[in-house]
Image (spheres, grey):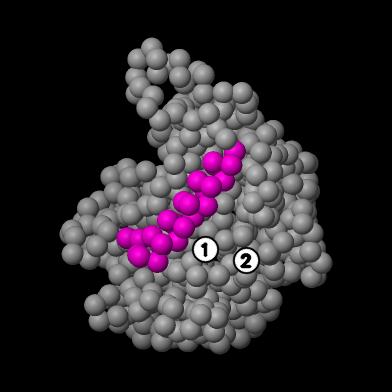
Amino acid sequence: MVTKLRETDVVIVGMGWTGGILAKELAEAGMKVVALERGRMRTPADDFAVPNIRDELRYTNRNDLMMNTAQDTLTVRNLVKETALPMRRLGSFLPGSGVGGAGAHWNGHTWRWTDHEFKIRSHYEQTYGKSFIPDDMTIQDWGISYEELEPYYDKFEYTAGISGKAGNIKGKIDSAGNVFEAPRARDYPLPPLESPYSSMMFEGVARDMGLHPFKRPTANASRAYTNPDGSQFGACQYCGFCERYGCEANAKGSPLITVVPIAMRNANFELRTNSWVQKVLLDSTGKKATGVLYVNMSTGEEFEQPASLVLLCAYGLNNVHLLMLSGVGQIYDPESQKGLVGKNYSYQIGTSAQLFFEDKIFNPFMATGGTGSVCDDYNVNMDFDRGKAGFVGGASISSGGTNGRPIEYRPLPPGSPRWGSQWKKNVAKWYNSTMSVSSSGSVMASRYNYLDLDPTYKNIFGAPLMRMTFEYAENERKQNAYMATVVNKIVDSMNPTFKTTAVARASWSVVPYQTTHNTGGAIMGTNPGNSVVNNYLQSWDVSNLFVMGASAFPHNAAYNPTGPVGAMAYRTAEVIKTRYKANPGPLL
């Protein structure tokens, strides 16, 4: 039996970065807000204290902060002709679970995506001609501009305490930052982190090759900081326990130390944990959301939470799945190319090489999630000739380790034994004398990369699992092969004692971890014929439903997605407060 609760102004599904931002902003605007988080409550004081947080078995090997695949997972295949099988354990990506979401365990890398991405089809057609874009490549303009988003990037960066150095402030270029970035109104709130020796070596070689390295901007506070909302950050301790972990020093920009506790202090806000939303409820027309149906995971009870406004703020893949289960929009079919929900799923592609030095010490245990230097010469650099290179998109090159954790980090030169006494000697010898150079590349949307509902497998509630069909297209293979050549050239210039070779990826696998940067499936665009949501992330079909996060991205860039995810959340919050609240309905 379903218990119907009292109606609220806003119901939020998921309590990570986007849920926290919307909850704080709308509660402060006087709206009654209920947030439903399917995982448990977390706070830094209760969950991230030393020594418990430095537990590799719990957090790296057993994924304590991540989605539980025994309860809900995906089915996965590379090609349409294959049968998808359930992902029984996490591998390629790590969706978060619990209050804070992926914002609790991320590394903090924070980037501004620009018109190079937002107007991607227009740019490539105008620069290289329409025939340069492959027929199966379904990229499109996003319906938004960098200029519109810049103030919200700024707001997110100052909320999250980003450490970095701007390369372009109001058109003034500073070579200490990213000389290729778009203009910004002001610098980052905090100076860059300290550079490890490996990054300094990388920067020297990169400059000698004519490249433009800079320190990576990241949500690891380089010094104590109080953000505009009064949230207090500690200085990063370079402990090496960042990705997959919460922060013991409150130095990592996270919804758990910023927007979430502020929202929870507001009388207009209520958080319900262990509350698993099953679907968005619609009225008889299918054009208006009336609330959501959810299950209390502690008791098994079902509840209907009526609401005037529904905000999907879960992880991007979960938002898409919820749209499908709720019957909002038509699910995409790659053969007929009809439907939009699930279309343009994208990931990332990369390659790397390891360098081993007999005569150098790197101390990899002294690191942060954002330690390192980056070159954007093959990414947002508009002078890089993609026509000559033969692909759409680009990649960043970086170096600088994020950890030297003893269980996880055991680099060995090629040809080393896999076990035994010599293995132990080699681990001890090379642990302190190894570094890497990596590339992180974009993935363009492709006709046959998509999400839909699996016809066979179901979750613990009997609902169909979401099915992921994804494989690297020829465009991405070309890009990755090109970047492997660049990485290897840099590696050779550093003269290591031993090295591995960066190799281009021929295929994607769900097994090894790569990135938790999944995008698409509820894409934004210029009209209902090419997108699920408008540029405010408002559903074209159901005007009182907003779908937040990277599910709105029509393709994936080389950059991590959190910067635009946070910025768009602030932009949506503002338009709800200033326009939608007084006059509910379509914003475009």
- State whether residue 376 appears in this view: yes
Given residues 587 and 374, the one toward you in this image is: 374
Q: Which residues are magenta?
A: 471-494
- Image-based side of 369 in relation to 82, left or right: right
- Image-based side of 14 in relation to 279, left or right: right
Q: What label does residue 394 carry, if any?
A: 1
How would you classify the magenta stretch by its main secondary structure? helix
Between disc 1 and disc 2, whose residue precedes?
2
Hey, which quadrant is residue 54 in on the image? top right
Q: Which residue is mark 2?
A: 381
Figure quadrant of the C terminus: bottom right
Residue at 48% in and 84% down: 129
- Image-based side of 389 in relation to 163, left or right: left
Please, what secondary structure does the residue beneath circle 2 have? Answer: loop
Hey, which quadrant is residue 57 in on the image? top left
| Residue 355 vertical position relative to residue 309 in the rendered view, above or below | above
Residue at 42% in and 82% down: 131
| Residue 146 vertical position relative to residue 193 in the rendered view, above or below | below
Q: Amino acid at mark 1?
A: Gly
Figure quadrant of the N terminus: bottom left
Residue at 72% in and 61% down: 179
Residue 296 image position (x, y, % from top left): 39, 52
Judge the density around disc 1: few (<14), some (14-19), many (≥20) Cα neighbours within 10 Å: many
1 and 2 marks in contact (CB < 8 Å) = yes
